[in-house]
Amino acid sequence: MAAVATAPPARRGATKAGRTPQAGPSPQAGKGKNGALAWLVIPALVFFVGFAVLPLIGVLVLSFTNWDGIGAISPAGLANWFSIFSDPLMYNALWLTFVIMVVSWLVQTPISLLLGTFTAGSQKYRAVLAVLYFLPLLLSSAAIAIAYKALLDPNFGLAEGLRLPFLAQDWLGLPELALGVVIFVIAWQFVPFHTLIYQGGVRQIPKSLYEAAEIDGAGRVKQFFFITVPQLKYTIITSSTLMVVGSLTYFDLVFVLTGGGPGNSTRILALDMYLKGFKANLMGPASAVAVILVAIGLALALLLQRIGGKDNSGSQLEGL
Amino acid sequence: MASVLSKAATAEPARTRRTPRRAGLRLRRFNVPAGVAGWLWLAVIIIPIYYVVITSLKTQAGYFGQNPLAVPASPTLENYKMVLAADFARYFVNSALITVGTVVPSLAFSFMASFAIVRGSGRFLKSVNALFLMGLAIPLQAVIIPIYLMIIKMHLYDSLLAIILPSIAFAIPLSVLIMANFIRDVPNELFESMRLDGCSEWQTLWRLALPLAKPAIVTVAIYNGLGVWNGFLLPLILTQSPELRVLPLALWTFQGEYSVNIPAVLASVVLTTLPILVLYIVGRRQLLSGLTAGFSK
């Protein structure tokens, strides 16, 4: 290691603005330094390759095998793929995942955007409200699901408490209602997170923009649509990416809240994989579903990054 | 000024039309629609929480007899005693163990890696960085089956270590991204002066980068810590013994066993949330900035 200290320094041009760790060192800055530095990434690399990259390859391999979760693994060719592509449950799961993704985005984005703008205000009462708005962030998905199961009970829950008969539905027992409940509870859980993101974004908008707009006579609504929203472009992209890619992973909440039911009305893709693999002991088909899950996740992440330009990997922590 | 950044103003476009053009700075006055909507949203958030807390203090008779939103007539802590008697102290310890066991190594590994990625160059480090960035898009659920297989083969099934190892791996990409961005903002002159003092990269890492990166490390620790603390999937798949349950899993099994005793079930929800609530009260700012992992900046 001592040899490294004497090596000439690496001149890094774009240290501050740098988005990628390129920034060429002087030619003789040498292998010594990079060699020593390379050792520092090894522990992280070993864990990441071992428990994320290899399993990613593994899931693809397993999708071409038969395995019951206990016994031996045997090759299965394309059988699992044929079976899931002729499985109505898989199409149902794909459709439900898509519906939840789109509706969740449509519900959560405007609410979070407005709440983020609201809580970024300097009034005292807004700060106090914000402290309470963020409470759902403290709860685990399991806790939230359990709380809502009790709350939605038609006889001893919210409907009876507020004496509103129309709320006294069998919320988790009817297929048409259960999906709506899932979307609502997801919003309840995740809107605070996105509110927090938008709050940070709004606070970074220069005040002078609003002052100028006010002198020009623009009202609140105009200021919101012509200053706040355009200025939040990158925040909206970040939040939407997390929301859309995250919607593939609502497993915990749905698992505890409905278990996929009633019937298969809330059996989303991740749940379909779990039930096929760990309940029906069909790891092969479950792996094929998992591969679809990965493919959708990667495709969405790439698509949204394309829309968002180069922003996302940038230095989001500037000024922290 | 901030009052102009109104929330519910959008819900009532008529408002601008009523506002005289010359009003200018008079817009600072109280934004009524935003206020109303703000309190309404508070109700949406608070009523479920209020319901959980008061119900957890009710007797079974109170639960069946009283209005669900009424304050308990004879508050009782019996439900909490019952939850504690159901071994929740052990589950608490398990959760703490997997959280610390994940956060500490993942922080150390990620910090070293991000330092190397920022300070170094060359194809190897670049591709490692690209690999980590790609890793951000891998959903844990999608690779749970091979992880399960690996854990069985390693003879780690049904142990806390089985939860910890994959958790470390999945904490790394975002941690490296955030810390690398942070280290990148350290002025080059500081690194330069360390070099002139004859420090090796290893010494620079500990003496310069580590103290400077503290805010990023706290952020990442909170984000990863909460993720593991509240995590459900890995414990569900990789453990089965009751004595190895972590809190979210214990909540789920408890509500399965005691589905007739809702006050006790809700007491378990409150009890498992208390530690995080204490954190929220003590260090709200840090917790919140940790929660968004810097996405809000």
Image (cartoon, rainbow, N blue to C red):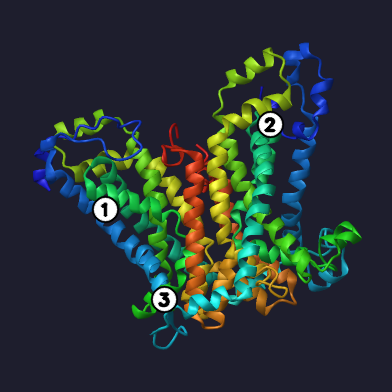
Q: Position of residue B202 (x, y in %)?
A: 20, 46
Q: Which residue is mark 3?
A: A62
* Residue B244 at least partly seen: no
Q: Which mark is residue A110?
A: none
Q: How many marks?
A: 3
Indicate whether B148 appears above or below B190.
Answer: below
Query: Which secondary structure lies at badge 1?
Result: helix
Indicate whether B87 appears above or below B277.
Answer: below
Q: Position of residue B181 (x, y in %)?
A: 37, 40
Q: CA distance from mark 1 to mark 3?
A: 29 Å
Is the residue marked by circle 2 packed among few (<14), some (14-19), or many (20+) residues within 10 Å? few
Q: Is residue A239 left or right of residue B48?
A: left
Query: Which secondary structure lies at badge 2?
Result: helix
Query: Which secondary structure lies at badge 3?
Result: helix
Q: Which residue is mark 2?
A: A124
Q: Dividing the picture into quarters, in which one does residue A165 lie?
A: bottom right
Looking at the image, which is closer to me, B224 or B9? B9
Q: Which residue is mark 1?
A: A41
Dot 3 or dot 2, earlier in sequence: 3
Q: CA distance from mark 1 to mark 2?
A: 46 Å
Looking at the image, which is closer to me, A59 or B206? A59
Q: Position of residue A101 (x, y in %)?
A: 62, 55
Q: Residue at coordinates 45% horizontally, 46% vertically from top-left? A: B219
* Residue B235 at least partly seen: yes
Label 3 or label 2, whichever lies nearer to me, is 3
| Three-letter amino acid code of the residue under disc 2 | Lys
